[in-house]
Amino acid sequence: MISVRIRASRTAASLRRAFAAAAISLPLLGAGMAAAGAATPVKLGITPWIGYGPIYVADAKGFFAKQGLDIKLVNFSDPSTIPGAVYSGQVAAATLTYDQVIGTNAKGWNLKVVMPIDYSAGADAMVSTDDITSVSQLKGMKVAYSPLTPSDFLLGYALKQVGLSEKDITTVNVPAEGVPGVMIGGSTKVGVTYEPSVTGILQADGGKKFHVLFSSKQAPGLITDVLVVTPKTISSDPAMITGFIKAFVQGEEYMKSNPDEADAIIGKALGEDVATAKAQLAGVENPTLAEMPTVLAKSDKLPSFWASGPVIGDLLKSEGQITAVPDIADTYDASFVDSLAGVK
């Protein structure tokens, strides 16, 4: 989703500097907890994000290590470059949003979703000054966002609901974490970004200047983070994929059974205080193992990709980002979550 989705309790500026370097490989929190014997090293292309809480918890508690996996994060400052890193083999797997998968597969890259990670439920948002009360007012206005990211997609979806397109606005191209600066500085009155930047904007000027104009809560299931790999990885290392999903689910369960400790782990991973991390978790939803197969099953109801995929594809096509919508069935491999969830 996603440029670097992170803000420390120090200052937003210091974190932007800290994570500005692209593709810095970092070990997850519990990498030193690897079980006896050689663990399988797995590079995961990622951008720090509250919805990846189960990943941070799973590593901190040694759940990945128990599955024989030595997970290492490769952080990207530009999310649009992550699909290429997976395709080229720079990383073994990656966290993407489903609209990125559709856009990438429209190029013929054939990446496969093997697990849904989270749904954005308000954590991605269009924020504006209080005098703007309708998306329809944006015609002819400047809007700050990062093109070819979920912010771009959410903006396009919101505009389409009122009969507009991105041709009707003036794009101010800035990274997601840079949107608060240009808005608070007065360069634009409207911006599209995600947490923690959304909260940062809303709290500016004593919380009396900006409000959420449109958010992912109004487009449920359209912004979904997923785990992707190549067909080659599916055939050559299925145990890695199964192990990752098992550890992730353990992370989810630990978040529910030990919420205070989990919030502290997630906050530490994202450079946030516990209260901020806890508040941001309300803006995302992690599907349980039992719920994961419904995302990949044929259905005309959200959050199934068969419901969201055509909407996403048509919007990307209308914006000129793709020339044809890929076959939804070719965008995922449901065998791993189906097997683990006991789906026949």
Image (tube, grey):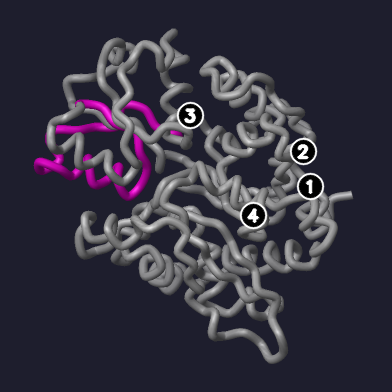
Label 4 element class: loop
Disc 4 or 2, which lies upstream in sequence? 4
Asked if the residue at tag 3 contacts the one at tag 4, i.e. Cβ–Cβ closer than 8 Å, the answer is no
Identify the residue shown where x is 72% and y is 45%.
112
Identify the residue position indicated by label 3 in the image.
153
Q: Position of residue 286 (x, y in %)?
A: 56, 52
Q: Nearer the viewer, mark 3 or mark 2?
A: 3
Label 3 element class: helix
Q: Is residue 291 magenta?
A: no
Please give the range of residues in magenta. 189-217
Q: What is the number of the mark on residue 241?
A: none
Q: Position of residue 305 (x, y in %)?
A: 68, 34
Identify the residue position indicated by label 2 in the image.
297
Q: What is the number of the mark on residue 334?
A: 1
How packed is label 4: few (under 14 Cα within 10 Å), some, or many (20 or more)?
some
Q: CA distance from mark 4 to mark 3?
A: 26 Å
Identify the residue position indicated by label 4 in the image.
288
Q: CA distance from mark 2 to mark 1?
A: 8 Å
Can residue 287 be seen?
Answer: no
Q: Nearer the viewer, mark 4 or mark 3?
A: 3
Q: CA distance from mark 4 to mark 2?
A: 15 Å
Disc 2 or 1, which lies upstream in sequence? 2
Task: Relative to 160, say whether 10 is above or below.
Answer: below
Label 1 element class: loop
